[in-house]
Image (tube, rainbow, N blue to C red):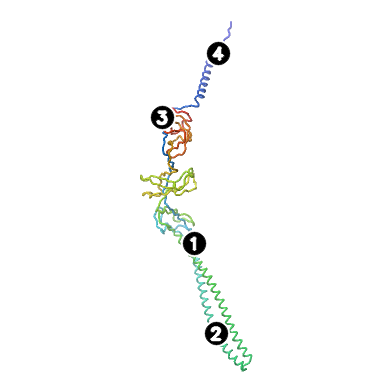
Amino acid sequence: MDRPIKKKTFTPQRIGIGLVVIAFLVFAVNTMINGSNSSLNVEREKLTLSQVEQGVFDEFIVVTGVVQPLKTYQLDAIEGGYVAEKLLDGGAKVKKGDLILSLENQSLMLDFVNRETQMYDLINNLENTRLQLKQDKFTLKKVLSELDFQILQAKDEFDRNSTLFADHIISQQEFTKTKISYERLVQQRAIEIENQKFQEENSVTQIRQLEGTLDRTKLNLKMMKDNLANLSVRAPVSGLLSRVDVEIGASITAGQNIGQIDDLNGFKMRVEVDEHYVSRIFPGLEGSFEFNGVLVKLQVSKVFPEVRNGRFDVDMSFEDEIPSGIRRGQSVPVRLQLGKPAQALLLQTGGFFSSTGGNWVYVLEPGGDKAVKRDISLGRKNPQFFEVLSGLEAGETVITSTYDNYGEKDVLNLK
């Protein structure tokens, strides 16, 4: 007789599935319960611990300063040409007037020769006009002298005939002829004087115009001569010829920069500052650096507003004597003050800031075995410390090394 076979309720497969489900539920419940208070074990030796302390917060930034001459003179070519001779190279000390380069410009030389020829032509024309004026004056004197003689004779004859005519010795016709001859000579003398006066005024006007043209030509010639002299590039001041950017045979255009001379009578410090501080840098701010074991004080003298590649330039002057041994181009780290020192809670800088933005940190508990996440607020920063505004107290210990491997765990267990 057949019997019905009862199916088993707990088969090995069902038991296995049940255990997996139970384990998952336990894990999920544990995650829900402990998710807000998760922890991570870390090695104490790999951490950087810093103590919060009360102290003086000195707001400053460290920038790189480069020693530069107090004054720099640019060498620009006044006239163009090609370099025929190069007498000095960069690095040479020069005195005012020393010859540095010699340029040649055939076009400028030819123009000068043509202008010089024009000037000599003007001089010849002027001398000829003056000579002609003198000759005309002599001619006038000669003509007037001859006319005066003829008038004198005609007058004498006219006076005699007037007497003879009055005594009825000569005829009316003869008397009239003598009178007309005399009056014609007198009138001719007046016309000659007027004509000679006109010619003299005309000659004087021509001379004045020629003299003006000659003066202008001489001035132009002098300017051209000065331009020819500018083909010899000389040092405008004494100092250090820091660079000459041309070689023999190179073609130079008018106005082209060809070098630089540094005034060695003083130095300044040129620093580059991040554009983040552009609104906080102004003339009068103080700075300092160490040189040969001596603290050298600086002061901001000029701020250049132009921002290039995220940075702007600042000139700083030396407050006291320039230290001996310092050289142009030398670079040093400069401590640039941004504000007055003040009392504050201080937390050392560290890699934690890049992970938290300064919004929270891990603070060690009194036992020193755990570090708990805590919200904080930070203020100003210098290369050494943050200014703590809230969330921490003096004497507490904070992990200031990087948090990149911790996620955002609430508790770190220190081993």
Q: Nearer the viewer, mark 4 or mark 1?
A: 4
Q: Residue at x 49, y 62 (%)?
A: 108
Q: Could you tell me how far apart the alpha carbons at marks 4 and 1 are, in whole angstroms? A: 117 Å
Say which element carries label 1: helix
Q: Are the residues at dot 4 and dot 2 in contact (C-beta closer than 8 Å)?
A: no
Q: Nearer the viewer, mark 1 or mark 3?
A: 3
Q: Which residue is mark 1?
A: 108
Q: Could you tell me how far apart the alpha carbons at marks 3 and 2 are, in whole angstroms? A: 135 Å
Q: Residue at x 55, y 13 (%)?
A: 9
The circle drawn on residue 148 is: 2
Q: Nearer the viewer, mark 1 or mark 2?
A: 2
Q: Which residue is mark 4?
A: 9
Q: Give the mark nearest the N terminus, 1 or 3.
A: 3
Q: Residue at x 51, y 74 (%)?
A: 130
User: Residue 54, how many percent across, how many down?
Assistant: 42, 36
Q: Could you tell me how far apart the alpha carbons at marks 1 and 3 are, in whole angstroms? A: 82 Å
Q: Could you tell me how far apart the alpha carbons at marks 1 and 2 are, in whole angstroms? A: 59 Å
Q: Give the mark nearest the N terminus, 3 or 2.
A: 3
Image quarter where the C terminus lies is top left
Q: Are the residues at dot 4 and dot 1 in contact (C-beta closer than 8 Å)?
A: no
Say which element carries label 2: helix
Q: Could you tell me how far apart the alpha carbons at marks 4 and 3 are, in whole angstroms? A: 53 Å
Q: Are the residues at dot 1 and dot 3 in contact (C-beta closer than 8 Å)?
A: no
Q: Amino acid at mark 1?
A: Leu
Residues 170 and 213: in front is: 170
Q: Amino acid at mark 4?
A: Thr
Q: Amino acid at mark 2?
A: Asp
Q: Which residue is mark 3?
A: 44
Q: Give the mark nearest the N terminus, 4 or 3.
A: 4
Residues 129 and 34: in front is: 34
